Image: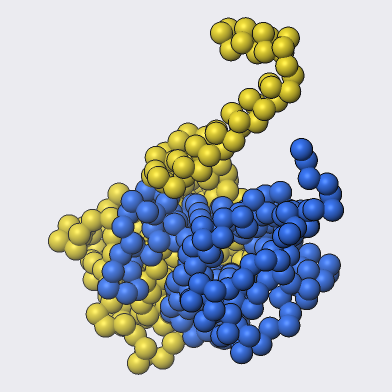
Chain colours: A blue, B yellow
Amino acid sequence: MEPSEAQWVRIHPLVVRITHWINALAILVMVTSGWRIYNASPLFPFRFPNEITLGGWLAGGLQWHFAAMWVLVLNGLVYVTYGIVSGHFRRKFLPLTPRAVLHDVMEALRGKLAHEDLSRYNAAQRAAYLTIILCLVVLVFTGLVIWKPVQFYAIGQFMGDYEGARILHFCAMALMVFVVLVHILMVVLVPRTFPTMITGRARRAS
Amino acid sequence: MKKRTMATSLAAHSPKLIRSVERRLFLRQGLSVGALAMLSGCNLTDDESVQKVLEGMSRWNDGAQALIFSQSRLAPEFPESAITKPFPFNAFYTEAEVTVVDGKDYKLELAGMIRDKKPWTLPELYALPQTSQITRHICVEGWSAIGKWSGVRFSDFLSRIGADTTAKYIDFECADDYSTSIDMATALHPQTLLTFRFADQILPPKYGFPMKLRIPTKLGFKNPKHIVAMTVTNEYPGGYWEDQGYNWFSGS
């Protein structure tokens, strides 16, 4: 028997669900093609294994990267605009204090973090999702400077010009990939959060 | 044929079942595309329809870059102290295989939409008013290096030979069998120089003797060396790397 409507809680609005999955795909393409581009002239003394990169060679990696960037940016603009205008960001991400984040991260590490109410993000979640958004903003602006160091010279002055942008672009990628991996791990540990990002709703905790 | 029979027989029994089967098929296909994307990125890029989309996006990016490009925005110039030493050698062959052009017999051939197609000898080119720049060369691979080049402003040369600057492209053919082509807007940019000297010395063979078109608003591979012929044209000329998948505009 279908549970009655009263037993369901709305968790994620449709716009958030759609932009989340488009973003996930765009990030997968951007990161794996970015690794292929990195391998052509590594900044640090290591390369990414070619098996986990996209594009086959430098030109292929660049084609994927500069195609998916439009998807990432346009989708990101829809998400951020919605988040600000609808009050979604304010409702979901605020308030956020360093103390609450530290507390919830410690609880999570001890495996004690509660997830009764999936419609509310705990402080560790808020910090994680905001970090990903912030990393993406940094990735887009450093990416613009690497792509067009002359035309976007003015933006480059905030990040040590072309060479500074390359390093920052890499660091923002590394931090974002780390948080995404933690995010995926948390979904694996609390699997009932997964269908909510598809259907948008969860059964009310009894 | 077989499929249709199955669908027809299913339809007779339960439309709901068809929907759920279709949905399952859709999910499975969706999943396999995802799995393919993750497991075999290289193979995915080789797929013909994927390649078409990627090439289409690359053409779109040519347009976007032409739109962003400004003829008055200058590439940064650096002091002598910032020059990278030694300046890296880069080509589609090794340094030992560098083409050595004989300067005495050399002539720059002109073709296409140009009024005066008389070929140019090196002494004639050296006699043109020269200017210098210390700019950053950015390679498509990601590395960058700063160097000093001297030569004639390309827009001056184009007006001297009576090139039709309403044409879309300029194509360059090189002594080392390299080729590339650029847009007219970039050709007319004040920092685009037809250079004969590197670090105040006549260009050594490894840096492109007898001449290199220096374009600080484009990636390194768009800066042809050992140029022997140039054509002003409205027909897309492509280029050595461009034909293999590198973005054509490749602006900085």
Q: Position of residue B202 (x, y in %)?
A: 27, 75
Q: Total label count?
A: 0
Residue B213, visible in the rendered structure: no
Q: Identify the image quadrant of the N terminus of chain B.
A: top right
Lateral position of residue A198 relative to residue B204, left or right: right
Instruction: Answer with the quarter of the image where residue A35 lies.
Output: bottom left
Residue A154, visible in the rendered structure: yes
Instruction: Answer with the quarter of the image where residue B199 lies.
Output: bottom left
Lateral position of residue A191 relative to residue B204, left or right: right
The residue sitting at 83% across, 46% down in the picture is A4
| Residue sitting farthest toward the front | A206
| Residue sitting farthest toward the left | B96
The residue sitting at 51% across, 61% down in the picture is A189
Decide which of B117, B234 is in the foreground and name it. B234
In the image, residue B150 sits, relative to residue B94, either above or below, namely: below
Q: Position of residue B217 (x, y in %)?
A: 51, 70
Instruction: Answer with the quarter of the image where residue B97 lies.
Output: bottom left
Lateral position of residue B146 relative to residue B231, left or right: left
Q: Position of residue B134 (x, y in %)?
A: 41, 82
In the image, residue B175 sits, relative to residue B3, either above or below, namely: below
Decide which of B70, A178 is in the foreground and name it. A178
Decide which of A52, A74 is in the foreground and name it. A52
Q: Position of residue B129 (x, y in %)?
A: 45, 77
Decide which of A90, B13 is in the foreground and name it. B13
The residue sitting at 52% across, 81% down in the picture is A106
Lateral position of residue A122 relative to residue B208, left or right: right
The residue sitting at 48% across, 76% down in the picture is A109
